[in-house]
Amino acid sequence: MSTMLVASPPSLREFRAHFQGLASLTRLRILEFLAGAGEVSVQDLADSLGVSQPRLSWHLRMLRRGHLVRTRRSGRLVLCSVHREGIVTFQRELSGLIAPRPKPRTLYQRSEG
């Protein structure tokens, strides 16, 4: 389970994975819990949220894919935490993606010039 860093601007597919990670009440509950708890083992997280470990692992995979959560191994434990840098990167890139731009000239306007 690797820690992914977003080095270059995210692709549209990565944006989709990021927002799919946020598109579940369970995953939002996981993020909310991790934001307050810091780094937690997957089993402790499953127990705290009342979710089965296999189901939680599936949700964590979606969150990792979207650069929302990081996981790391410590012996036999898998520890997870909020990937704050990944979230900030996507927020910044989304702002750039939807920033106002000058209107492109239409084909009709180009031929008049």
Image (cartoon, rainbow, N blue to C red):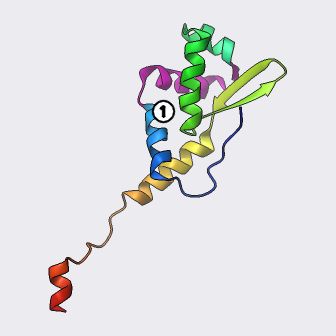
**In the image: residue 1, left or right of residue 45:** right
Q: Which residues are magenta?
A: 23-41
Q: Quadrant of residue 4?
A: top right
- Number of numbered discs overlaid on the protein picture: 1
Q: Quadrant of the N terminus?
A: top right
Q: Quadrant of residue 77?
A: top right
Q: Position of residue 65 (x, y in %)?
A: 56, 36
Q: Which residue is mark 1?
A: 21
Magenta span: predominant SS is: helix
**In the image: residue 43, left or right of residue 10:** right
Please say whether residue 78 is one of the residues in the magenta stretch: no
Q: Quadrant of the C terminus?
A: bottom left
Would residue 39 be seen by someone viewing this image from the given angle?
no
Q: Nearer the viewer, residue 34 or 66?
A: 66
Q: Position of residue 41 (x, y in %)?
A: 71, 18
**Residue, x 14% and y 81% (percent of image)?**
108
Q: Position of residue 106 (x, y in %)?
A: 20, 76
Q: Nearer the viewer, residue 101 or 62?
A: 62
Q: Considering only vertical position in the picture, is 68 above or below 56?
A: below
Would residue 52 be seen by someone viewing this image from the given angle?
yes
**Residue, x 48% and y 48% (percent of image)?**
91
Q: Amino acid at mark 1?
A: Gly
**Residue, x 47% and y 47% (percent of image)?**
13
Q: Quadrant of residue 55?
A: top right
Q: Considering only vertical position in the picture, is 83 above or below 6?
A: above
Q: Position of residue 8 (x, y in %)?
A: 59, 58
Q: Considering only vertical position in the picture, is 68 above or below 57?
A: below
Q: Considering only vertical position in the picture, is 41 above or below 105?
A: above
Judging from the image, what secondary structure is the residue with disc 1 in?
helix
* Farthest right residue in view: 75
